[in-house]
Image (cartoon, grey):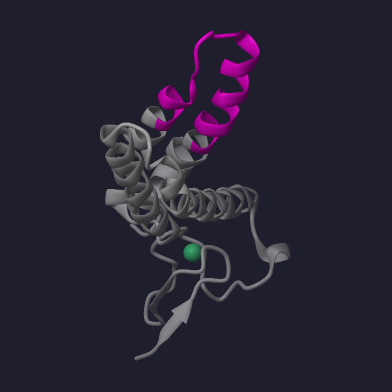
Amino acid sequence: MGIKKCSFCKISSSDEIELCPVCGINKSKTNKNELEKDEIKRNYFCRAIRVVAILLTLLGAFKIYLLPHFLQSNINVIIIQLLLGILQIITGIGLYKYKYWSYYMAIPLYVILFLLSLTYPFTLTSIGIQSIIWLLPLYYIANSKSRKFFSRKYAN
Ligand SMILES: [Zn+2]
């Protein structure tokens, strides 16, 4: 019994299973040209989630890296930024592996990051830009196709 990596979502599983447990694409397919219409969409969302996961992790690491610059500010701010940075890294790693728990962490986390990104005075432009930055990833994670990666619905 061996392990085979899916060419599309990059998740490894036993080669005895024909369909990838995450994206549900037959593991014998390795090229995009072999994909059917729905599988092309699934592949698109798989990739989008990996990009979102990497960005979330990097932003979390960057937030922690920048913390020494905030040392003069309120201790509560530092603690909150540190916790958020750690949560971002953990959630990002979970998302990269399409873990079910990371789906439930990502939704409140992105809403919090969105709300914290809004600065007074509120203008439509700034709200619009922050929505794209923080709510677009949420769309890639929580749409009906992506949700099934996390709950392993395609495998059954
Ligand atoms: Zn897959």
Quadrant assignment for the N terminus: bottom left
Residue 132 lies in the magenta-colored region: yes
* Residue 124 pos. (x, y %): 61, 9
Residue at 30%, 37% in the rendered image:
80
Q: Position of residue 85 (x, y in %)?
A: 38, 47
Q: Magenta part mainly helix, strand or loop? A: helix
Answer whether residue 45 is visible to the viewer in this image. Answer: yes
Q: Residue at x 44, y 67 (%)?
A: 19
Left or right: 31, with 100 as reference point: right
Q: Position of residue 95 (x, y in %)?
A: 41, 53
Q: Magenta segment, which residues?
A: 113-137
Above or below: residue 113 compared with residue 1: above
Asked if the stretch drawn in magenta spans residue 79, the answer is no
Residue closer to the observer: 127 or 19: 127
Q: Residue furthest right?
A: 33
Q: Quadrant of residue 7?
A: bottom right
